[in-house]
Amino acid sequence: MILISRKILNTRTSCLQEEQRIPISKDVITSSSASAMWFIRDACGIVCAIITWLLVLYAEFVVLFVMLLPSKNLMYSIVNGTLFNTLAFLALASHLRAMCTDPVSQVGAVPKGNATKEYIESLQLKPGQVVYKCPKCCSIKPDRAHHCSVCKRCIRKMDHHCPWVNNCVGENNQKYFVLFTMYIALISLHALVMVVFHFLYCFEDDWTKCSTFSPPATVILLILLCFEGLLFLIFTSVMFGTQVHSICTDETGIEQLKKEERRWAKKTKWMNMRAVFGHPFSILWFSPFSTPDHGKAETYQYVV
């Protein structure tokens, strides 16, 4: 890594060739497309996102048409149907927000290729001041940022790239990803409980009366739902736990994996939670339609 002075910068005509550093105001990294919808055109991620929706819709089908509608207990069907559909709706809404939200910041992604001679000169650097530049996307690199090979951008506070939401999990969409894992875990648990009760009901009653489908078809549909629910309950519960732990410790998955030196101020767990979900604590923490206020810091410190 080489520190490049203003004198050297004045001789450059293209992207800076090495990584450098300087504190820069938030306005500097504002993207012209900050208000546009964010979507990653990755074939694997798109397929995984579609599979996610299909699995939730399959669970909806089995819960409604195999277990609840044929039930003789109207109150049981109404209560469980309302609860399951509400959780499923919140899960899919959280998935959409996590997938279509710029993970970098509310002001937009770091513009690709902005580490040019003209751009650096416009920052009016003082003698001795330096900036860091990502050699992969040729952009000024924000503090705690890592380059994502799928998004092809530097992502600030990048935890990981999740193909199931076809996006990176970063500072601006981590709330929606946490809510997505939480609601998927809840509907998985709810579906498993209803499957157990339905099996008990069918064993005690006539199988031909406990479902509008044939007994073999009913058993196959319930077993598939049971397998899906158990698999996703374990997977999303683990993901939810690791995400909450990362938020409380204010250390992303990549930072933990690389054992990076902590260069940012240490805050309490409650402050870290509020930084992700919004200020102050309210029911809006659990809403995928509420955009959290990540604070109004005037500057970002650009480091490797």
Image (cartoon, rainbow, N blue to C red):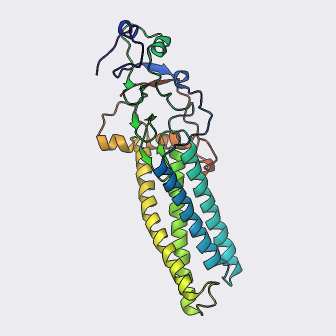
Question: Can you give x and y, in whole percent of width and height, for residue 76 in the image?
Answer: 66, 77
Report if residue 182 is visible in the image.
yes
Report if residue 266 is visible in the image.
no
Report how many numbered discs are placed on residues in the image: 0
Q: Is residue 76 or residue 18 the one in the foreground?
A: 18
Residue in the picture at 53% in, 34% down: 105
Residue in the picture at 36% in, 27% down: 135
- Compared with 76, 169 (above or below) is above
- Compared with 107, 84 (above or below) is below
Question: Can you give x and y, in whole percent of width and height, for residue 195 in the image?
Answer: 53, 78
Question: Can you give x and y, in whole percent of width and height, for residue 62 in the image?
Answer: 59, 74
- Compared with 160, 126 (above or below) is above
| Image quadrant in which the C terminus is located | top left
Q: Is residue 51 left or right of residue 290?
A: left
| Image quadrant in which the N terminus is located | top left
- Compared with 150, 209 (above or below) is below
Residue in the picture at 52% in, 25% down: 29
Question: Can you give x and y, in whole percent of width and height, for residue 46 in the image?
Answer: 51, 51
Q: Is residue 275 or residue 291 the one in the foreground?
A: 291
Residue in the picture at 44% in, 21% down: 115
